[in-house]
Amino acid sequence: MTGQQLNALQGKRILITGGAGFIGSNLCEVLLDNNIKVVCLDNFSTGKRINIAPFFNNSNFELIEGDIRNLDDCHKACVDVNYVLHQAALGSVPRSINDPITTNDVNVSGFLNMLVASRDAGVKRFIYAASSSTYGDHEALPKVEDTIGKPLSPYAITKYVNELYADIFYSTYKLDTIGLRYFNVFGKRQDPNGAYAAVIPKFVQQFVDHESPIINGDGSYSRDFTYIDNVVQMNINALTIDNSKALNTVYNVAYGERTTLIELATLLKKYLSKFDEDIKDIEIKHRDNRIGDIPHSLASIDKAKQLLNYNPKYDISSGLKEAVNWYWENLK
Protein backbone atom coordinates (compact mmCIF):
# COMPACT_ATOMS: atom_id res chain seq x y z
CA MET A 1 0.00 0.00 0.00
CA THR A 2 1.69 3.15 -1.22
CA GLY A 3 1.03 6.85 -1.24
CA GLN A 4 0.66 6.66 -5.00
CA GLN A 5 -2.15 4.11 -4.65
CA LEU A 6 -3.98 6.22 -2.09
CA ASN A 7 -3.49 9.35 -4.21
CA ALA A 8 -5.27 7.53 -7.04
CA LEU A 9 -8.36 7.37 -4.84
CA GLN A 10 -8.49 11.10 -4.16
CA GLY A 11 -11.86 12.51 -5.16
CA LYS A 12 -13.42 9.05 -5.23
CA ARG A 13 -16.32 7.97 -3.03
CA ILE A 14 -15.98 4.51 -1.49
CA LEU A 15 -18.78 2.56 0.15
CA ILE A 16 -17.78 0.16 2.92
CA THR A 17 -20.59 -2.17 3.93
CA GLY A 18 -20.19 -3.46 7.45
CA GLY A 19 -18.02 -0.41 8.03
CA ALA A 20 -18.59 -0.47 11.78
CA GLY A 21 -17.26 -3.99 12.05
CA PHE A 22 -13.75 -5.20 12.74
CA ILE A 23 -12.34 -5.23 9.21
CA GLY A 24 -14.65 -2.51 7.90
CA SER A 25 -13.68 0.04 10.54
CA ASN A 26 -9.98 -0.54 9.89
CA LEU A 27 -10.61 0.11 6.20
CA CYS A 28 -12.56 3.26 7.05
CA GLU A 29 -9.68 4.51 9.20
CA VAL A 30 -6.98 4.11 6.55
CA LEU A 31 -9.05 5.73 3.80
CA LEU A 32 -10.16 8.64 5.99
CA ASP A 33 -6.59 9.18 7.21
CA ASN A 34 -5.71 9.72 3.56
CA ASN A 35 -8.51 12.23 2.93
CA ILE A 36 -10.68 9.83 0.92
CA LYS A 37 -14.48 10.00 1.04
CA VAL A 38 -16.08 7.05 2.81
CA VAL A 39 -19.70 5.94 3.11
CA CYS A 40 -20.33 3.38 5.86
CA LEU A 41 -23.42 1.16 5.65
CA ASP A 42 -24.12 -0.86 8.77
CA ASN A 43 -27.12 -2.14 10.74
CA PHE A 44 -25.04 -2.63 13.92
CA SER A 45 -26.08 -6.25 14.35
CA THR A 46 -22.43 -7.16 14.86
CA GLY A 47 -20.68 -3.85 14.13
CA LYS A 48 -20.17 -1.34 16.94
CA ARG A 49 -20.61 2.41 17.04
CA ILE A 50 -17.48 2.74 19.16
CA ASN A 51 -15.46 1.43 16.20
CA ILE A 52 -16.45 4.38 14.04
CA ALA A 53 -17.00 7.04 16.72
CA PRO A 54 -13.65 8.73 15.90
CA PHE A 55 -14.88 9.34 12.34
CA PHE A 56 -18.16 11.13 13.13
CA ASN A 57 -16.59 14.61 12.97
CA ASN A 58 -14.74 13.87 9.74
CA SER A 59 -16.36 15.69 6.82
CA ASN A 60 -15.32 12.85 4.49
CA PHE A 61 -17.29 10.28 6.50
CA GLU A 62 -20.97 9.47 6.00
CA LEU A 63 -22.87 6.86 8.03
CA ILE A 64 -25.98 5.22 6.62
CA GLU A 65 -27.69 3.03 9.17
CA GLY A 66 -29.30 0.34 7.06
CA ASP A 67 -29.44 -3.35 6.25
CA ILE A 68 -28.08 -5.07 3.15
CA ARG A 69 -31.17 -7.30 3.24
CA ASN A 70 -33.15 -4.18 2.27
CA LEU A 71 -32.58 -3.33 -1.40
CA ASP A 72 -33.67 0.28 -0.87
CA ASP A 73 -30.94 0.72 1.75
CA CYS A 74 -28.39 -0.69 -0.69
CA HIS A 75 -29.50 1.66 -3.45
CA LYS A 76 -29.34 4.62 -1.08
CA ALA A 77 -25.82 3.71 0.02
CA CYS A 78 -24.58 3.36 -3.57
CA VAL A 79 -25.57 6.84 -4.73
CA ASP A 80 -22.53 8.53 -6.37
CA VAL A 81 -20.24 5.72 -5.19
CA ASN A 82 -17.22 4.80 -7.33
CA TYR A 83 -16.08 1.66 -5.49
CA VAL A 84 -17.58 -0.79 -3.02
CA LEU A 85 -15.71 -2.68 -0.32
CA HIS A 86 -18.32 -5.22 0.73
CA GLN A 87 -17.47 -6.48 4.22
CA ALA A 88 -20.98 -6.91 5.63
CA ALA A 89 -21.76 -10.52 6.51
CA LEU A 90 -22.66 -12.82 9.35
CA GLY A 91 -19.47 -14.69 10.09
CA SER A 92 -18.85 -17.83 12.15
CA VAL A 93 -19.29 -21.47 11.24
CA PRO A 94 -21.09 -22.30 14.53
CA ARG A 95 -23.52 -19.39 14.08
CA SER A 96 -24.43 -20.68 10.62
CA ILE A 97 -24.98 -24.19 11.96
CA ASN A 98 -27.25 -22.86 14.71
CA ASP A 99 -29.14 -20.46 12.42
CA PRO A 100 -28.59 -21.23 8.72
CA ILE A 101 -31.59 -19.17 7.57
CA THR A 102 -30.35 -15.84 8.92
CA THR A 103 -26.82 -16.54 7.71
CA ASN A 104 -28.17 -17.21 4.23
CA ASP A 105 -30.42 -14.12 4.27
CA VAL A 106 -27.51 -11.83 5.11
CA ASN A 107 -24.68 -13.49 3.22
CA VAL A 108 -26.53 -14.50 0.04
CA SER A 109 -29.65 -12.32 -0.31
CA GLY A 110 -27.81 -9.30 1.13
CA PHE A 111 -24.85 -9.91 -1.15
CA LEU A 112 -27.13 -10.12 -4.19
CA ASN A 113 -28.84 -6.87 -3.17
CA MET A 114 -25.46 -5.14 -3.03
CA LEU A 115 -24.49 -6.45 -6.45
CA VAL A 116 -27.76 -5.22 -7.94
CA ALA A 117 -27.45 -1.81 -6.28
CA SER A 118 -23.82 -1.50 -7.42
CA ARG A 119 -24.76 -2.43 -10.97
CA ASP A 120 -27.62 0.06 -11.02
CA ALA A 121 -25.40 2.85 -9.66
CA GLY A 122 -22.64 2.24 -12.19
CA VAL A 123 -20.06 1.31 -9.56
CA LYS A 124 -16.65 0.87 -11.16
CA ARG A 125 -15.41 -2.03 -9.03
CA PHE A 126 -16.93 -4.28 -6.35
CA ILE A 127 -14.43 -5.78 -3.89
CA TYR A 128 -15.92 -8.33 -1.52
CA ALA A 129 -14.95 -10.38 1.50
CA ALA A 130 -14.81 -14.02 0.49
CA SER A 131 -13.64 -16.78 2.84
CA SER A 132 -11.10 -19.55 3.22
CA SER A 133 -14.04 -21.72 4.33
CA THR A 134 -14.77 -22.14 0.62
CA TYR A 135 -11.97 -24.72 0.44
CA GLY A 136 -14.14 -27.07 2.50
CA ASP A 137 -12.97 -30.66 2.69
CA HIS A 138 -10.18 -30.28 0.13
CA GLU A 139 -7.17 -31.53 2.06
CA ALA A 140 -4.23 -30.37 -0.05
CA LEU A 141 -1.96 -27.68 1.40
CA PRO A 142 -1.35 -24.92 0.59
CA LYS A 143 -4.78 -23.84 -0.61
CA VAL A 144 -4.72 -22.63 -4.22
CA GLU A 145 -7.54 -20.49 -5.55
CA ASP A 146 -8.70 -22.69 -8.42
CA THR A 147 -9.07 -25.91 -6.38
CA ILE A 148 -11.78 -26.15 -3.74
CA GLY A 149 -13.61 -28.99 -2.00
CA LYS A 150 -17.09 -29.61 -0.65
CA PRO A 151 -18.34 -26.97 1.83
CA LEU A 152 -18.51 -28.10 5.46
CA SER A 153 -21.00 -25.58 6.86
CA PRO A 154 -23.88 -23.32 5.83
CA TYR A 155 -21.51 -20.35 6.20
CA ALA A 156 -19.07 -21.90 3.71
CA ILE A 157 -21.89 -22.46 1.24
CA THR A 158 -22.95 -18.80 1.44
CA LYS A 159 -19.44 -17.55 0.77
CA TYR A 160 -19.04 -19.85 -2.22
CA VAL A 161 -22.38 -18.67 -3.61
CA ASN A 162 -21.06 -15.11 -3.34
CA GLU A 163 -18.22 -16.02 -5.68
CA LEU A 164 -20.63 -17.57 -8.17
CA TYR A 165 -22.87 -14.49 -8.13
CA ALA A 166 -19.90 -12.16 -8.56
CA ASP A 167 -18.78 -14.12 -11.60
CA ILE A 168 -22.26 -13.95 -13.13
CA PHE A 169 -22.51 -10.19 -12.54
CA TYR A 170 -19.31 -9.68 -14.49
CA SER A 171 -20.23 -12.00 -17.37
CA THR A 172 -23.81 -10.68 -17.58
CA TYR A 173 -23.61 -7.03 -16.52
CA LYS A 174 -19.85 -6.26 -16.80
CA LEU A 175 -19.58 -5.28 -13.13
CA ASP A 176 -15.91 -5.76 -12.27
CA THR A 177 -15.41 -7.71 -9.04
CA ILE A 178 -12.58 -9.07 -6.92
CA GLY A 179 -13.14 -11.62 -4.16
CA LEU A 180 -10.74 -11.75 -1.22
CA ARG A 181 -10.68 -15.09 0.59
CA TYR A 182 -9.75 -14.05 4.11
CA PHE A 183 -7.79 -16.48 6.26
CA ASN A 184 -8.34 -16.04 10.01
CA VAL A 185 -7.97 -12.28 10.22
CA PHE A 186 -7.06 -10.74 13.59
CA GLY A 187 -6.12 -7.37 15.04
CA LYS A 188 -7.39 -4.21 16.69
CA ARG A 189 -11.15 -3.80 17.13
CA GLN A 190 -11.88 -7.52 16.81
CA ASP A 191 -14.55 -8.23 19.41
CA PRO A 192 -13.56 -10.69 22.18
CA ASN A 193 -17.12 -11.01 23.48
CA GLY A 194 -20.09 -13.09 22.47
CA ALA A 195 -20.77 -16.71 21.66
CA TYR A 196 -19.09 -16.46 18.24
CA ALA A 197 -15.97 -14.49 19.12
CA ALA A 198 -12.86 -15.33 17.08
CA VAL A 199 -10.18 -17.35 18.80
CA ILE A 200 -7.46 -14.69 19.21
CA PRO A 201 -9.48 -11.91 20.92
CA LYS A 202 -11.31 -14.54 22.96
CA PHE A 203 -8.04 -16.06 24.23
CA VAL A 204 -6.65 -12.58 24.94
CA GLN A 205 -9.71 -11.65 26.99
CA GLN A 206 -9.46 -14.91 28.95
CA PHE A 207 -5.78 -14.40 29.72
CA VAL A 208 -6.39 -10.79 30.76
CA ASP A 209 -9.17 -12.02 33.08
CA HIS A 210 -6.86 -14.75 34.44
CA GLU A 211 -9.07 -17.47 32.98
CA SER A 212 -7.86 -20.59 31.17
CA PRO A 213 -8.37 -20.46 27.39
CA ILE A 214 -10.00 -23.61 26.04
CA ILE A 215 -8.68 -25.13 22.82
CA ASN A 216 -10.94 -27.32 20.69
CA GLY A 217 -9.06 -30.61 20.31
CA ASP A 218 -5.47 -31.31 21.23
CA GLY A 219 -4.17 -28.03 19.83
CA SER A 220 -2.65 -29.52 16.68
CA TYR A 221 -5.20 -27.92 14.35
CA SER A 222 -3.50 -25.07 12.48
CA ARG A 223 -4.50 -21.84 10.75
CA ASP A 224 -2.92 -19.23 8.52
CA PHE A 225 -3.54 -16.31 10.89
CA THR A 226 -3.54 -12.98 9.06
CA TYR A 227 -2.98 -9.60 10.68
CA ILE A 228 -5.45 -6.84 9.81
CA ASP A 229 -2.89 -4.52 8.20
CA ASN A 230 -2.14 -7.21 5.59
CA VAL A 231 -5.87 -7.37 4.83
CA VAL A 232 -6.15 -3.59 4.50
CA GLN A 233 -3.19 -3.62 2.09
CA MET A 234 -4.91 -6.26 -0.04
CA ASN A 235 -8.15 -4.27 -0.21
CA ILE A 236 -6.33 -1.10 -1.28
CA ASN A 237 -4.40 -3.07 -3.89
CA ALA A 238 -7.66 -4.53 -5.19
CA LEU A 239 -9.20 -1.05 -5.42
CA THR A 240 -6.31 0.50 -7.29
CA ILE A 241 -4.79 -2.23 -9.48
CA ASP A 242 -4.70 -1.17 -13.12
CA ASN A 243 -4.55 -4.56 -14.80
CA SER A 244 -7.59 -6.16 -16.40
CA LYS A 245 -6.07 -9.62 -15.83
CA ALA A 246 -6.29 -9.04 -12.07
CA LEU A 247 -10.04 -8.45 -12.12
CA ASN A 248 -13.04 -10.79 -11.88
CA THR A 249 -11.34 -13.50 -9.91
CA VAL A 250 -10.60 -14.43 -6.29
CA TYR A 251 -7.47 -14.23 -4.16
CA ASN A 252 -6.24 -15.72 -0.92
CA VAL A 253 -5.56 -13.09 1.74
CA ALA A 254 -3.14 -14.59 4.23
CA TYR A 255 0.49 -14.55 5.29
CA GLY A 256 1.35 -17.96 3.90
CA GLU A 257 2.39 -19.69 7.13
CA ARG A 258 0.41 -21.82 9.57
CA THR A 259 0.36 -21.79 13.33
CA THR A 260 -1.15 -24.47 15.57
CA LEU A 261 -3.67 -23.46 18.20
CA ILE A 262 -1.33 -24.52 20.98
CA GLU A 263 1.46 -22.41 19.45
CA LEU A 264 -0.97 -19.50 19.22
CA ALA A 265 -2.03 -19.75 22.87
CA THR A 266 1.61 -20.04 23.94
CA LEU A 267 2.60 -16.91 21.99
CA LEU A 268 -0.31 -14.94 23.44
CA LYS A 269 0.64 -16.00 26.94
CA LYS A 270 4.24 -14.92 26.31
CA TYR A 271 3.36 -11.48 24.94
CA LEU A 272 0.68 -10.75 27.54
CA SER A 273 2.98 -11.82 30.38
CA LYS A 274 5.08 -8.73 29.65
CA PHE A 275 2.16 -6.68 30.97
CA ASP A 276 1.06 -9.08 33.71
CA GLU A 277 3.52 -11.72 34.96
CA ASP A 278 0.74 -13.82 36.49
CA ILE A 279 -0.49 -14.71 32.99
CA LYS A 280 2.52 -16.95 32.36
CA ASP A 281 1.17 -19.43 34.95
CA ILE A 282 -2.34 -19.74 33.49
CA GLU A 283 -3.18 -23.27 32.34
CA ILE A 284 -4.38 -23.93 28.79
CA LYS A 285 -7.31 -26.38 28.69
CA HIS A 286 -8.80 -28.58 25.97
CA ARG A 287 -12.18 -29.93 24.87
CA ASP A 288 -13.59 -31.89 21.90
CA ASN A 289 -13.16 -30.61 18.35
CA ARG A 290 -15.93 -28.44 16.96
CA ILE A 291 -18.34 -29.54 14.21
CA GLY A 292 -17.54 -27.99 10.83
CA ASP A 293 -13.92 -27.11 11.61
CA ILE A 294 -11.23 -28.15 9.16
CA PRO A 295 -8.01 -29.52 10.67
CA HIS A 296 -5.53 -27.33 8.81
CA SER A 297 -5.49 -24.21 6.71
CA LEU A 298 -2.58 -22.72 4.79
CA ALA A 299 -2.81 -20.35 1.84
CA SER A 300 -0.76 -19.97 -1.26
CA ILE A 301 -0.41 -16.22 -1.79
CA ASP A 302 1.47 -16.52 -5.09
CA LYS A 303 -1.50 -15.37 -7.18
CA ALA A 304 -2.01 -12.26 -5.03
CA LYS A 305 1.69 -11.43 -5.21
CA GLN A 306 1.78 -11.82 -8.98
CA LEU A 307 -1.43 -10.04 -9.94
CA LEU A 308 -2.20 -7.68 -7.04
CA ASN A 309 1.35 -6.83 -5.93
CA TYR A 310 0.52 -8.19 -2.47
CA ASN A 311 3.41 -8.02 -0.01
CA PRO A 312 2.23 -8.83 3.55
CA LYS A 313 4.27 -7.05 6.19
CA TYR A 314 3.12 -8.85 9.34
CA ASP A 315 3.75 -12.49 10.23
CA ILE A 316 2.00 -14.14 13.18
CA SER A 317 4.56 -12.95 15.72
CA SER A 318 4.72 -9.28 14.71
CA GLY A 319 0.96 -9.18 14.19
CA LEU A 320 0.23 -10.65 17.62
CA LYS A 321 2.55 -8.14 19.28
CA GLU A 322 0.63 -5.27 17.66
CA ALA A 323 -2.72 -6.83 18.55
CA VAL A 324 -1.74 -7.57 22.16
CA ASN A 325 -0.57 -3.99 22.68
CA TRP A 326 -3.94 -2.70 21.44
CA TYR A 327 -5.97 -5.18 23.48
CA TRP A 328 -4.06 -4.44 26.65
CA GLU A 329 -4.98 -0.77 26.34
CA ASN A 330 -8.61 -1.45 25.44
CA LEU A 331 -9.70 -4.51 27.44
CA LYS A 332 -8.63 -3.52 30.92
Image: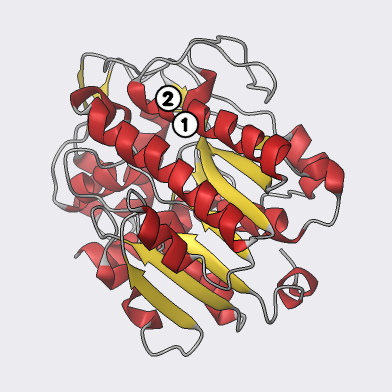
Q: Which residue is mark 2?
A: 156
Q: Nearer the viewer, residue 317 or 305?
A: 305
Q: Picture quarter containing residue 203? A: top left
Q: Picture quarter containing residue 118? A: bottom right
Q: Kindly identify the amino acid type of the residue bearing the numbered disc 1.
A: Lys
| Position of the N terminus by quadrant | bottom right
| Position of the C terminus by quadrant | bottom left
Q: Position of residue 260 (x, y in %)?
A: 44, 26
Q: Position of residue 183 (x, y in %)?
A: 51, 36
Classify mark 2: helix, strand or loop.
helix
Asked if residue 140 lies left or right of residue 49, the reply is right
Q: Residues within 10 Å of mark 2 (few under 14, many from 20)?
A: many
Q: Picture quarter containing residue 93? A: top left
Q: Which residue is mark 1?
A: 159
Q: Position of residue 220 (x, y in %)?
A: 40, 17
Q: How many marks?
A: 2
* Label 2–label 1 contact, CB within 8 A: yes
Asked if residue 198 lies left or right of residue 124, the reply is left
Q: Position of residue 112 (x, y in %)?
A: 47, 42
Label of residue 46 in the image: none
Classify mark 1: helix, strand or loop.
helix
Q: Is residue 229 visible?
A: no
The residue located at (60%, 50%) in the rendering is: 127
Q: Kindly identify the amino acid type of the residue bearing the numbered disc 2.
A: Ala
Q: Give the distance between the C-alpha atoms of the residues marked 2 and 1, in whole angstroms.
A: 5 Å
